[in-house]
Structures are given as structure tokens and as C-alpha cells.
Amino acid sequence: MQVKRFVIAVAVAAALATSASALDAPIEAKGSIESVILYRGQALVTRVVPFEAPAGTVELVVRDLPEQILGDSLYAGAQDGTQVRAVRYRTRAVGEAPHEEVRRLDEEIEGVEKEIRKKQDLQQTLAGRMAYLGKLENFIAPTAQVEMSKGVLNAKTLKELTLFMFEERGDQADALFELKEEQKELQKELDLLRRHRAKLTRGSSRTEREALIFLEKADAGPARVRLSYLVGNASWSPAYNLRASGKLENVEIEYNALVRQISGEDWNGVALTLSTASPMMTADAPALAPLLISLQRPGKGRQAQPADEQMLRGQFSAVQRKFREAQKSLQYNPDRYTQIDRNWKLNMVSNSAQGLELMVSGRNTRALQELQRAESSGLSVNYKLPGGTSVASRSDRQIVRIADLTLPTTFSNVAIPLLTEQVHRQAEIANNSETALLEGPSSVYLDGDFVGKGTLPVVARGQKFVVGFGTDPQLRGWREFVSRTETIQGGNREVTLKYRLVLDNYKDQPADMRVLDRLPCAKADIRVTLGDMEDAISDDVEYLRAWRPTGILRWDIEVPAHSAAATARIIEYSFKMEYDRNMQIDVVSEERMQTEMRAKFERQMLAN
């Protein structure tokens, strides 16, 4: 009876031990990707991981995390009575048992390696024999010389020894050559076998990336956990197709995203959001350190005052690049000391940026203000794409549609005879949609025909922008230099120049045309005056504000149908320059133009 009770007790204990070990074993799951927020360079991936477990403490292992995961970015959330206690990232090496062909190759490789070792041993033996022959030769030659001096030389014996030496050396050399050739062939065979084996076993040894999630479960049964993590090698950029019909009333814009992701996992049917923001995985605000300044003699400091706007642009760009890198490092903080170090680096970069503000002077002050505004004017937008989107993990770019827009447009024909005889179509488009547009390349179509490529600027909601639609072959314009007269008035020289702008329209209907030309943009010591004209300068407010002060002339005219040759539309104008009679006109050098006008020219172009 006691023995029976003892057996039952042992069985119960074993059962309880087995049950306890089963409960303590971690639960493995993979889950599926539910949503992705794709940033510029990274992506925030969220997996939904369903599992089933009893109440109490649960260790959940999420397998098959992607190769480009940023381990410090892992976080998890749960609902319905399940609480996440901790999340940890780990990697481990995983191997697979070799199959039969690999075992056969291993045997062949071992056999070839054995044969190579034999050849090497034989070569060493032959090398020893060759060394012995050398020693024998060193013995025979002095002995023969001594015997010759004593008159007791045995010529027959010397001949036999000499012939023996020659034959042996020849035989040994041939044998050594054969061994080396055989070893070379064996080495080729060994390399081939090893390459074949490497091809068969490629991927058999890999690194498994896993998330360990420690949970506290209130009730037994099924539950779900959402696991999120950042991955690298994922980005997107905007691209556009612009289409217009012959009516020239609206422009249809296909707003696409060129997506590239090689994170190591495919995104199949996910809720995809495209974002221009930066992912932030830390809840702490950055700390601001004091800025220390001191006085020193010019030229002794590490940061010199920018001499011109071009140098200022270079310094500003370098500082901003470092500033963005420092900000990016604060996306997540693995530990307190790393957080302090990264905050300090961010403050040091900001010191350089603020140093430019403290030292800039003159016209560069205005330039720095404009550079700072341009840097901070980027739109931070999120485009949540409807439905499920699939993006495979591969190196080539994949097109994802963001939006289809139809926007009201005003078309115009722009002629710049000074630069080209071609007349270009321009569309002024009003973005009355709810979608902000980012800067990106565009392909332009008119009546279904490809016109050319361009670049769309950053366009906020409600903003207008200009897009080129190529040239109109039925319109043409050129510039004629009519005359130059020169007179002396007291101490001044007066020079009057006349020009003619000729505009052709081969169409059956009139064409509205915007015609551009220019006056010299001079300093105060040269006075430039525009003469009287039949065609008035444009009264467009934006043109008068931004371009007219720089000497750019613009006429908004109508060119009648069938205007060409004798019936061409003509614009005539003249201007007068007055300056010291002892001086002469000279065009400013390209270097000076680069310093004084390039930045302003770029800003005006970007504004249009």
C-alpha cells in the first residue's frame, strides 16, 4: 500500500513538473505587418502578434525580424488586461544540418586535401635529396683537387661520380616539377569543390533577430500585442505626371511616390503612410546648454566672419547638415549617458549656427535671414494612402500613387528673344486641393504627348506655382539691335540704344504672349532711363515688386493670328545711359556677378 502511494506521488510530482516547465517555456510567434509609416531614410513598422497563453507572466518571442532593424527602437503595446513589462532585442546564430550532397562534398574535399599533403611531403623529401647531392658535390670537388695534386687521381671513379650527380639532379628536378604540377591541379579541384559546397550551404547559417516581450496576462486565452520598430534602408521621394488638354483650362496632376525599401521584409497589404517628418522614439526634450563667448583678435579664432554671401552659404549648409545629423541621433536614447552625450553634441552644433548670427554683418545679415527661412520652410506632411499597399523588399524603386488632382490653371506664352527664339508655354496653377505638394521631378504631357521633364516646387495648400509645358512651334520671337547714338552733355556722356522685338504667330487665332527683355542694372554712378514706348510695361504687381527694380522688362501683349514677316507684331523700345565722359561702360565679371547677383537671382526664380 505504501509502495502504491509512493508511485502515485512520484507520478503527480512528475506531472506537475512537466506542467510547470510547459508554462515557463516562452511562446514563439511571428505576427503580420499591419501598418508602416515611411519616412525619408527610415520606416516605422508595426506588427500585430496574436498568441494564446494562460494568465500570469508570459514570455513572448517574436521571430523573423528584418535585417535592417534598429534594435534600440523596439517598443510594444497590448490591451484587454495584458500589460507589457519589458521589451528586449536579441540576435542569435542559427545553423542547419548538412544534407547528403554536402556530406559527399566534404568527403571529396578531405580526400583532395590528403593528396595535396602527400604531394607536399614528397616535395620536401626531394628537397632533402637535392640538399644531399649538394653536400656530396661539395665533398667530391675538393677531394678530386687534392688527389690531382698528389698524382693519385682515379679518373674512372671521378667520371662515374660526376655522371651520377648529373643524372640524379636531372631526375630530382623532373620529379619535383611533376609534383608541383600535380599539386596545382589538385588545388584547382579543391577550390572548385569548396565553391560548390559554399553555394549549397549558402543561407544554412544565418542570424535570427528576435524581440523578447515580457507580459503580465490577467486572463487565460487569446490576446494580441502590437510590436513597433524602426528599420533603415527605406525611403521615398515625390514624382509627378502633369497632363493638360488642348483646351488649356485645367492641369491633371498624378502625385506619385517613388518608394525604395531593402529592409529585409516585404510589406504586403499594409496601411502605408508617407511622412516628411522625422521619427521620434524618445519622450525627453533636449537640454539647452549655455553659450560662452569671448573676445579675440581677428583671424585668431576658429570661425571667421563670412567674407561674402557665397562663403556664408557654404558655412550655413555645413552647419545645417551637422545639425540635422545631431537631431536625428536623438530619435531614441539607449541609456542616460548616451542621451547626455548626444544632447551635448547637438548644443555644440547649435553654437556654430548661433555664432554665424553673432558675427555676420552688412548685407550678409539679410542673406542669413533668408537662408534660415528657406531652411525652416519645408512642409511636414503625412500622406495616409487608402486601402492596403504592398511594397516588396528590393533595390529598385516602386511607384505608389498618393493622389490624383485636377487644378485650375492659367496658361501663358513666354518669349525671351534675348535668350532664345522659341516661345515657351507656362501654366500658373492654383493648388486649391487639400494636398500639399513636395518638391520632386515631373513628367509633363500635353494632349497625351510627352513634352519634357521638369521639377515641381514645394506647394502649400492654396498656393500658386508655375510649370513649364515646353515650346509652341507656331510661335516665335527674336531681338534686333536697331541703333546706338552717343553725345556729350557737359561732363557727361549720353548713350541711347534702340531695340526691336519681333514676334510671329502662325496660328489661326490670336495668342497672348508675355515678352521679357532687360535694361542694364547699374550702380549710382550710371543713370539708366527707359524711353517712351507705344507698348506699356506690364502692370502685374508681383513683377513690379520683384523683377522691375533689377532692370527686367515685361510686356503682356496679344499677337494677332497669321502674324509673320511684314505683319509680325513689333515691340520697339529704347533706353539712355548717362555717366562720366571720362569713363567707359564695362560688363561686370562673372566672379563679381556670382558674388552680388547669383543668390538674388536664385531666390527670385524659386519664388516663381
Image (cartoon, helix red, strand yellow):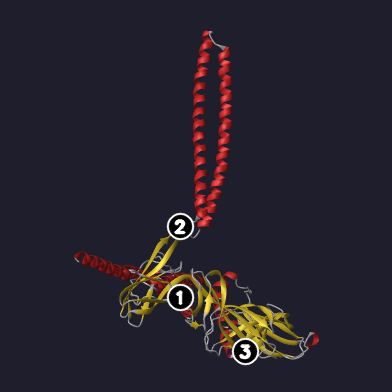
Q: Amino acid at mark 3?
A: Thr
As helix, strand or loop, the secondary structure at mark 3 comes to strand
Crowding at mark 2 (Cα within 10 Å: few <14, some 14-19, many 20+)? few
Between disc 2 and disc 1, the foreground one is: 2
Q: Is residue 500 left or right of residue 356?
A: right
Kindly report the distance in space between the C-alpha atoms of the residues bearing marks 1 and 3: 45 Å
Residue 558, above or below 59? below
Question: Who is closer to the viewer here, 164 or 357?
Answer: 164
Secondary element type, mark 1: strand
The amino acid sitting under disc 1 is Ser
Residue 549, percent from left and from top: 58, 84
Crowding at dot 1, Cα within 10 Å, few <14 / some 14-19 / many 20+, comes out as some
The answer, for residue 166, to whether it is visible in the render is yes
Relative image position of residue 583 (x, y in whole percent): 62, 74
| Left-right relation of 407 to 562 | left
Disc number lying in front (1 or 3): 1
Q: Is residue 197 above or below residue 54?
A: above
Location of residue 154 in the rendering, given as x and y in whole percent from the top left corner:
55, 11
Residue 409, disc? 3
| Residue in the image at 58% along x and 38% along y | 181
Residue holding disc 2: 97
Residue 82: image quadrant is: bottom left
Front-most of 495 and 155?
155
Residue at 50%, 37% (x, y): give it: 118
Distance Cα–Cα, label 2 vs label 1: 28 Å
Name the image quarter holding the C terminus: bottom right
In terms of sequence position, does the residue under pointer 2 or pointer 3 come before the other? 2
Circle 2 or circle 3, nearest the eye: 2
Judge by depth and name the residue closer to the eye, 380 or 481.
380
Seen in the picture, residue 377 relative to 167 is either above or below; the reply is: below
